Amino acid sequence: MNVRDSEAVESMLVAAGHEKAAGEEDAELVIVNSCTVRQKAEEKAVGKAGNLIAAKKITGLMGCAVKRLGEDVFKKLPKLDFAVGPRAIGLIPKIVADGRFPRLELGEDMMSEALAAHVNGGFQAFVTVLVGCDNRCSYCIVPDVRGHEYSRPAREIVAEVRALASHGVREVCLLGQSVLRYGKRNTAWDERDAPSPGGYTEAFPRLLEAISAIPGIARIRFTSAHPKGCTDELLRAYREFPQVCRHLHLPVQSGSDRVLAEMGRHYTREEYLAAVRKLRDFDPEFAITTDVIVGYPGESEADFEETRSLMEEAGFDNSFVFKYSPRPGTRSAALPDDVPTAEKERRDQVLLADQERRGQLRNDALVGTVRVVLVEGPSKRNKSRWSGRDSGNRIVVWDDPSGVSAKAGDMVRVAITEAHPQILIGKIC
Ligand code: 5AD
Ligand code: SF4
């Protein structure tokens, strides 16, 4: 979501007549986008802004850390020129044009210009479908900084994807904190919209149906999901629309029912695993990735082992492990942060090692298969190798020293010859 917001600000500034600098050193204006989901993330962004101020540029800070810090952002960074919250980024071009610093905009309301997708000449684009979150998980600061859940009108999203397709976009990634809740808190489809030809009644599968009908859009991804959203209608949409990619990022956070209840996740271990089984029964190659928190207050060794075994049972294709970080104002911040740092680190390492092994096994099973890959471009580390992603979001790499077999945005077939925990290697066929 932050990548999308940064892209949106870039395109707004370019539209206002600014020019993109070759690099940070050449820029007259630099804006740092910030996250505050963990204390470390916030410190990193604030630290970076501090370094840029020292380099005497016009410096702005945007995003979630600004919203959390409010006025205090200027205590941390006295020479910061401007600070803008995540729902106020549409104001940035005007703030820059006015040049009246210091300036703080926290932005309580939705700003539609800040939601519009960005066309950068590439073939992939992020499209915001839902903002904010009302889930109130005990540890999470997102509702405080990104505000209430709001689904954008479906007709606005469809029109935007149409425009993106006409600019050459082939893959869209639909974004929301809990994207399967699309149209649940506010109505996203209204009576002026055509009835759903497929008979879909749930707002999100219906959106997938509408976007699948847009010529030129070869792939539709979305993130993030909650197991409650894995309904039969969603499964039907996966089955009916080949453009919808067979990958779901389904954050689990913990495998212990006790911890899940404390976190307020609204599912049990068994309910979560049932959602995973549903997806894998439908397609055994369905890629499922997750987020896990280690060291939540009171997380015992037994709780941690429950997480480990859940991850094994779910057979995650990839996972992101986070060490618990108390965030001011959240429910869990009132609990003692009682798992020692060294123990959080150990649990993190254990899960990472498990994932390496599991990722290798999952990928080994794909050797000998043919992946349909959307080409992204030459690999950053080795220019004679090209890379792209399959429907499951797996990174697929192949040799093409002269870069003749395909270009970015093409769809190719790659026969897999070699597997690693995080990448598949093969030959174009
Ligand atoms: N501490 C550690 N990790 C967190 N996450 C969210 N809040 C916290 C926190 N307070 C993790 C969750 C979420 C991911 C984006 O960040 O796993 O899915
Ligand atoms: Fe970080 Fe959450 Fe904000 Fe995203 S919404 S940038 S994860 S604090």
Image (cartoon, helix red, strand yellow):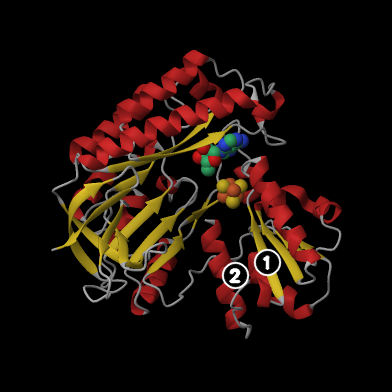
Furthest-bottom residue in this view: 17
Would you say 295 lies left or right of 313 here? right
- Residue found 26% across the figure and 65% down from its top: 218
Could one spot residue 407 in this view of the protein? Answer: yes
Residues 230 and 156: in front is: 230
- Residue found 67% across the figure and 73% down from its top: 25
Is 332 located above or below residue 149 in the figure?
Answer: above
**Mark 1 and mark 2: Cα distance apart in space:** 9 Å
Image quadrant of residue 5?
bottom right
Three-letter code for the amino acid on which mark 2 is drawn: Val
Q: Secondary structure at mark 2?
A: helix
Q: Quick check: marks 1 and 2 in contact, CB under 8 Å? A: yes
Could one spot residue 266 in this view of the protein? Answer: no
**Image location of residue 237, percent across then percent down:** 24, 50
Residue marked by disc 2: 9
- Residue found 66% across the figure and 43% down from its top: 40
Three-letter code for the amino acid on which mark 1 is drawn: Ile
